[in-house]
Image: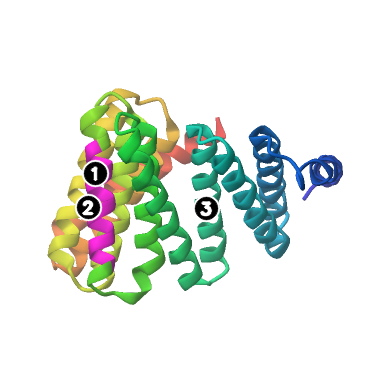
Amino acid sequence: MLFGQAGESSDAEASYGEASAIFERLTPDSNDPLIHDGFGRCQNSQDLLLQDLGNTEPARKLLHGAIEHFSMAVALDNRLRFSRRKLSAQLDLGHLLNESGEDTLASESFRLAIAGYDELLTQHADQPELLHGMAAARLSLANSLRHRGDKPVIDAYESAIATFTEIVERQPRAMHFRENLAIAQLDFAQFQHAVALAHKARETATQSLENQLAVINCDPEVAGYHATEATIRHTLGEILSDLAEDDFAITAFDGAIAKFEGVTVESCV
């Protein structure tokens, strides 16, 4: 970290600490959902800063605190935005636990998020962002289970992809939803390849590439879209190589290299 960045991080930590001290004095006897929501947001922001600094254990404690205060806000006033913040923090906790190698706890956190989104969708079925949150939670669960290599993992991926597909059907012009579908299909294809389901992996990777190309055709100027395409093509090349379809594999690898080179050149301009 650069000296200036270190100084800025220290100042941010101090500011969050002062804000937290104020909230701690306000919350014990408070029945104001906005105070609990504010404390939750403060802890959530402080957690992200600590994660950037590599302080995972204090970050985890802050996330637990944020979830507790968001839950209190929901209990006092069942506003949709309070519930969404709670579930977002629940997902963040799952990702933090997953990165720390605590797969079982991570899976439990993702399942809690899925249950929460499921409950919200029964009340707000017309909210695409809630459906997207559900899809993201299901994909996170699938990725946290993938080391097991069993049927529940396949079910989790298929459930996530089905939910992303539903979002795309509802919002066909929202390209960020379609790219997330392509990424979910890429993750599933990589899992299928890893557990020797190469033919299914080829089909899934091909679907992923088709969706990503649709995204790029809509907005070809976004470099990140091309980087995702390159990753999909490289994965497809590995799958085709294992299937002894060498000519097709070479074509896929060549396409991946060209895309990676294009993205690299653009990032240097």
Answer yes or no: is residue 258 visible.
no
Q: Look at the picture and state if 185 lies above or below 55.
A: above
Q: Nearer the viewer, residue 4 or 174?
A: 174
Secondary element under disc 3, as helix, strand or loop, is helix
**Membership of 208 in magenta stretch:** no
Secondary element under disc 1, as helix, strand or loop, is helix
Q: Which segment did they paint magenta?
A: 153-166
The residue at 79%/41% (across/down) is 23
Q: Which mark is residue 90?
A: 3
Image quarter of the C terminus? top right
The residue at 61%/46% (across/down) is 72
**Membership of 165 in magenta stretch:** yes
Answer yes or no: is residue 203 visible.
yes
Task: Find disc 2 in the rendering and name its residue.
Answer: 205
Tags 2 and 3 touching, CB below 8 Å? no
Q: Quadrant of residue 155?
A: bottom left
Measuring from the top left, give residue 104's x and y in whole percent.
46, 72
Measuring from the top left, give residue 150's x and y in whole percent.
26, 74
Q: Residues within 10 Å of mark 3 (few under 14, many from 20)?
A: many
Instruction: Give, as a three-letter code, the residue at label 3.
Output: Gln
Q: Quadrant of residue 234?
A: bottom left
Instruction: Give, as a three-letter code, the residue at label 2.
Output: Ala
Side of 169 where 62 appears, left or right? right
Work out how far the residue at label 1 is from the one at label 3, CA to CA, in angstroms: 31 Å
The residue at 51%/59% (across/down) is 94
Q: Look at the picture and state if 226 lies above or below 208.
A: above
Q: Nearer the viewer, mark 2 or mark 3?
A: 3
Tags 2 and 1 touching, CB below 8 Å? yes
The residue at 63%/54% (across/down) is 63
Q: Nearer the viewer, residue 78 or 243?
A: 78
Task: Find disc 1 in the rendering and name its residue.
Answer: 209
